[in-house]
Image (cartoon, coloured by chain):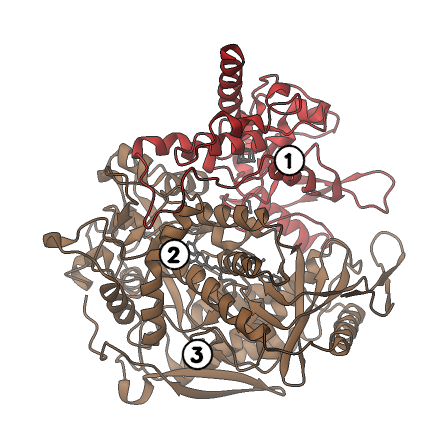
């Protein structure tokens, strides 16, 4: 098999693609293939890694034109065509690179964020938007002596959103983010919703008003790419739809 | 105070693509009262405390804090909340927690530190709840608790099997909310010692390759474990033990480095952890003959005996031919049913499916033991203070010694938060009575790092640094793994020394300093080789079996000669070993039976 990798650093005029041939062994992940590239082909390649177990969220990149975690993506499954994810179109996933998906894996940086080097993108914007929605618990009451009680029934819905690992795969898959760089994006909105539905918070509708603006809840066009690429099955779409519903209802009541 | 520093210029020649010279100037020297190195749970909890004190602090981390290894912790965190009654309706308390911890440690833990941790545990779990962590809940709305290995009560509080993720995100949210300065993707290269105290550090800003100096009145090491010194490890790839080498290099001793925990259940192939929570929920271990072999090794606790016991049992089954081809046994959850697996162990299921193509609802999971935790670390007292004034350590990089010779599952997340907070308090006191540091030593330290990098870059290429790393991790697992003996270890030590020697002549191809991850790995591997040597020397010297340290040539625990902590320090180029007593408290050493 071959790994075809996007290469860029700021002294280069245009990016280029390097192709590296390696042996396909069972269990080889894209991250594993990148390490082989680094160790045996060119040690100047740059990519993010940490947990190698799909929990830290640092290795999202565009793999065969789909944003995914490199550590979780099995090369064999890609070559077999098992991991196809149909996405609503946006420019970054245009088939503009010559590559043979039967024997090559194409690896490019995550779209919609500036490339620093090779597969490393600058995540500042993603985290700025995250910060903008004030991701911190704002409890309703003063601190009790023991734990606040929580109905176990309320946990599964919350977990849908607390499971987010802030990998930004959704950000790199969202056609709206591509179009409108100011759009807060699926992850930040899903995070805001997580706090809104936390029964221990009592800011009610005020909480979701933080994103009651064109570049917040209202920018989403329900393409649904975010949900399809999310490695943790977080459903930003549902959060967005429900938040809008709440805001609309309140608008009518007033 | 923020000064520009001297404009030291390093000229580098790029061998790649074309010949370009890159000039990297020393950007700046930064001043903060307290520096926290590490953005995992320990570092973030300390940052929160420092931020509340009003002192100026900063956190430095080689990865974005959310990518720290703490995020991967699965099973939970221990505290004797007593939310779930034990057998016969008995109620848990912190003394029972302390007893289990001390017994689990094979009596090598310092009991004053254990008592403190177990006492503080309850408030610590509540505190996370108050900060917003979504803990799993019981029907009555209280925080849920599950049984864990070596514990007499269902004491482990959990957030499904993503406890570390939930805790780390909560703390990051809290620290972000305080606008605490974070130097992200800065790789710390040295600690600065001046007039007998620690006054800062140097670091490479990975994205630009610039070298920065940091001046402070105190430094807290919160750099995590060194698991990646072994080739089968559950740890994140970044767990290279840098903090320990940094400490060694300023003459600070490391403690109990021979005690390395091997987790019994890591996924065959990738060694990703399959949490002890899986057995806590009722999972069982089965060998290739279909036997539930733990009944033989630990008749009372069976599959939930402590980690050292279970890991040895599995390894023995495999060695005696009762494993599956390739060297693994089965962790069977199928009898738990899909509802329970989906509710309590969704992360485990996902990992097994993604990385082994196995759905635990339908089939057993192939598992084998793998390196998991570093009990040893920077020698620190109950306040986190090291021998060097101004230098503190907490979390997995430290050995305050709450885990002794074997850590109990769920006690490490606890340690990070308890000591992240308590040690920060001690630092805050220390700072208020400490004079201003002198900038000059930091400037010199920057020069040293620059010359060192220049020297490394100027070497002639003779071999691949990554192959030396592979040799090292293989030697460590094979010769200093679950079962050890003097002869094999002596051979292993020789191999490690040869590798160190070989490595000292190696270089890397990429000579460009900006975003040079191979340079970072070069520095990590250099440090790991030293740690490998340290582990080897300490393990050879301890001629007994205790906790995780199992010697086939000395199978018994020997309290008369070895109920003591090992200290090792770097003196010039030599590693010297000495010992110090263990603090015994409420619990007299007894034989450990499960
Ligand atoms: C898979 C797994 C599951 C676990 N599950 C549990 C569990 O259920 N319960 C439990 O109690 N314990 C568990 N543990 C153990 C526990 O997770 C760790 O011991 C704990 O999280 C360590 O936290 P820490 O803050 O000390 O270090 P870490 O979280 O490892 O953080 C270290 C930090 O130091 C920084 N750093 C390191 N070197 C440098 C350098 N040179 N320059 C700059 N920064 C540096 C890193 O960037 C990182 O931010 C588990 C461990 C593993 C491997
Ligand atoms: S919602 Fe999913 S894809 Fe988006 S950042 Fe979170 S985990 Fe990643
Ligand atoms: S390396 Fe952590 S998610 Fe891929």
Q: Position of residue B47 (x, y in %)?
A: 55, 58
Question: Quadrant where the N terminus of chain B lies?
Answer: bottom right
Mark 3 highlights which residue? B489
Q: Is residue B116 left or right of residue A230?
A: left
Q: Is residue B524 left or right of residue B268?
A: right
Chain in brown colour: B
Residue B266 can be seen in this image: no
Q: Position of residue B493 (x, y in %)?
A: 50, 79
Q: Nearer the viewer, mark 2 or mark 1?
A: 2
Q: Nearer the viewer, mark 2 or mark 3?
A: 2
Q: Is residue B391 left or right of residue B2?
A: left
Q: State whether discs 2 and 1 lie on one chain.
A: no
Q: State whether discs 2 and 3 lie on one chain.
A: yes
Secondary structure of residue under mark 3? helix
Mark 2 highlights which residue? B124
The residue under the point 44% across, 68% down is: B478
Q: Position of residue A180 (x, y in %)?
A: 72, 24
Residue A3 can be seen in this image: yes
Q: Nearer the viewer, mark 1 or mark 3?
A: 1
Chain in red colour: A
**Gap between marks 1 and 3, in whole Å?**
53 Å
Quick one: which residue is furthest to the left in this view?
A: B88
Q: Which class describes the residues within 10 Å of circle 2: few (<14), some (14-19), or many (20+)?
A: many
Is label 2 in contact with label 1 (beta carbons under 8 Å)? no
Q: Who is closer to the viewer here, B112 or A206?
A: A206
Q: Which mark is residue A109?
A: none
Q: Which class describes the residues within 10 Å of circle 1: few (<14), some (14-19), or many (20+)?
A: some
Q: Which mark is residue A129?
A: 1
């Amino acid at each position: 098999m071959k790994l075809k990798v996007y290469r860029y650093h700021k002294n280069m005029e245009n990016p280029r693609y390097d192709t590296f041939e390696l042996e396909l062994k069972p269990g080889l992940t894209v991250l594993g293939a990148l390490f082989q590239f680094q160790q045996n082909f060119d040690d100047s390649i740059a990519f993010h890694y940490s947990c190698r177990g799909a929990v830290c969220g640092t290795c999202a990149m565009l793999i065969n034109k789909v944003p995914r975690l490199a550590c979780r993506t099995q090369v064999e499954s890609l070559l077999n065509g098992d991991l196809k994810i149909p996405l609503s179109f946006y420019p970054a996933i245009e088939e503009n690179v010559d590559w043979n998906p039967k024997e090559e894996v194409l690896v490019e940086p995550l779209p919609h964020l500036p490339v620093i080097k090779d597969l490393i993108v600058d995540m500042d914007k993603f985290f700025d938007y995250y910060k903008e929605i004030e991701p911190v618990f704002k409890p309703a009451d003063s601190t009790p002596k023991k734990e606040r009680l929580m109905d176990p029934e309320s946990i599964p819905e919350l977990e849908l959103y607390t499971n987010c690992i802030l990998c930004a795969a959704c950000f790199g898959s969202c056609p709206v983010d591509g179009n409108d760089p100011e759009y807060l994006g699926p992850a930040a909105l899903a995070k805001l919703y997580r706090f809104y539905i936390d029964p221990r918070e009592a800011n009610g509708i005020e909480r979701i008003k933080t994103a009651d603006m064109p570049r917040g809840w209202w920018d989403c066009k329900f393409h649904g790419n975010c949900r399809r690429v999310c490695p943790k099955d977080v459903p930003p779409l549902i959060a967005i739809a429900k938040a809008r519903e709440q805001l609309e209802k309140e608008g009518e009541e007033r | 105070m923020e000064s520009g520093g001297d404009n030291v210029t390093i000229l580098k020649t790029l061998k790649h693509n074309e010949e370009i010279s890159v000039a990297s100037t020393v950007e700046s020297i930064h001043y903060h009262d307290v520096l926290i190195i590490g953005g995992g749970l320990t570092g973030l909890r300390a940052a929160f405390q420092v931020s509340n004190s009003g002192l100026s602090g900063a956190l430095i981390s080689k990865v974005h804090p959310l990518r720290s290894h703490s995020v991967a912790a699965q099973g939970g965190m221990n505290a004797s909340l007593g939310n779930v009654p034990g057998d016969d309706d008995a109620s848990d308390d912190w003394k029972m927690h302390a007893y289990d911890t001390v017994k689990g440690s094979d009596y090598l833990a310092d009991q004053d530190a254990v008592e403190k941790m177990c006492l503080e545990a309850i408030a610590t779990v509540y505190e996370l709840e108050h900060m917003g962590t979504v803990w799993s809940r019981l029907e009555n709305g209280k925080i849920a608790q599950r049984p864990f290995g070596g514990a007499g009560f269902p004491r482990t509080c959990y957030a499904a099997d993503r406890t570390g993720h939930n805790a780390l995100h909560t703390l990051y949210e809290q620290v972000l909310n305080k606008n605490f300065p974070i130097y992200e993707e800065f790789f710390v290269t040295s600690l600065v010692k001046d007039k007998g105290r620690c006054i800062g550090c140097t670091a490479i800003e990975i994205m630009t390759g610039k070298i920065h100096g940091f001046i402070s009145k105190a430094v807290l090491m919160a750099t995590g474990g060194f698991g990646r010194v072994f080739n089968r490890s559950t740890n994140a790839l970044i767990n290279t033990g840098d903090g320990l080498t940094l400490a060694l290099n300023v003459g600070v001793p490391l403690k109990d480095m021979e005690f390395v925990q091997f987790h019994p259940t890591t996924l065959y192939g990738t060694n990703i952890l399959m949490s002890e929570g899986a057995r806590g929920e009722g999972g069982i271990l089965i060998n290739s003959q279909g036997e539930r072999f733990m009944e033989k090794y630990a008749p009372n606790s069976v599959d939930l005996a402590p980690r050292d016991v279970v890991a040895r049992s599995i390894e023995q089954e495999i060695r005696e031919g009762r494993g599956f081809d390739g060297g693994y046994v089965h962790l069977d959850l199928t009898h738990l049913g899909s509802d329970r697996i989906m509710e309590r162990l969704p992360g485990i299921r996902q990992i097994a499916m993604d990385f082994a193509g196995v759905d635990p609802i339908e089939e057993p999971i192939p598992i084998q033991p793998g390196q998991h935790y570093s009990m040893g670390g920077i020698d620190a007292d109950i306040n986190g203070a090291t021998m060097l004034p101004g230098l503190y350590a907490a979390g997995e990089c430290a050995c305050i010694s709450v885990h002794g010779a074997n850590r109990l599952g769920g006690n490490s997340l606890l340690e990070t938060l308890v000591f992240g907070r308590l040690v920060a308090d001690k630092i805050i006191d220390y700072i208020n009575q400490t004079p201003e540091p002198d900038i000059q030593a930091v400037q010199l330290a920057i020069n040293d790092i620059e010359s060192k990098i220049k020297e490394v870059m100027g070497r002639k290429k003779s071999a691949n640094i990554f192959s030396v790393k592979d040799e090292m991790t293989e030697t460590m697992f094979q010769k200093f793994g679950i079962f050890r003996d003097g002869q094999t270890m002596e051979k292993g030590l020789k191999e490690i020394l040869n590798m160190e020697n070989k490595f000292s002549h190696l270089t890397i191809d990429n000579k460009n300093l900006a975003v040079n991850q191979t340079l970072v790995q070069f520095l990590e591997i250099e440090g790991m080789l030293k740690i490998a040597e340290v582990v080897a020397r300490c393990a050879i010297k301890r001629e007994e079996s205790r906790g995780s340290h199992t010697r086939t040539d000395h199978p018994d625990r020997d309290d008369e000669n070895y109920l003591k902590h090992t200290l090792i320090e770097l003196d010039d180029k030599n590693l010297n070993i000495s010992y110090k007593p263990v603090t015994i408290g409420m619990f007299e050493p007894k034989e450990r039976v499960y």
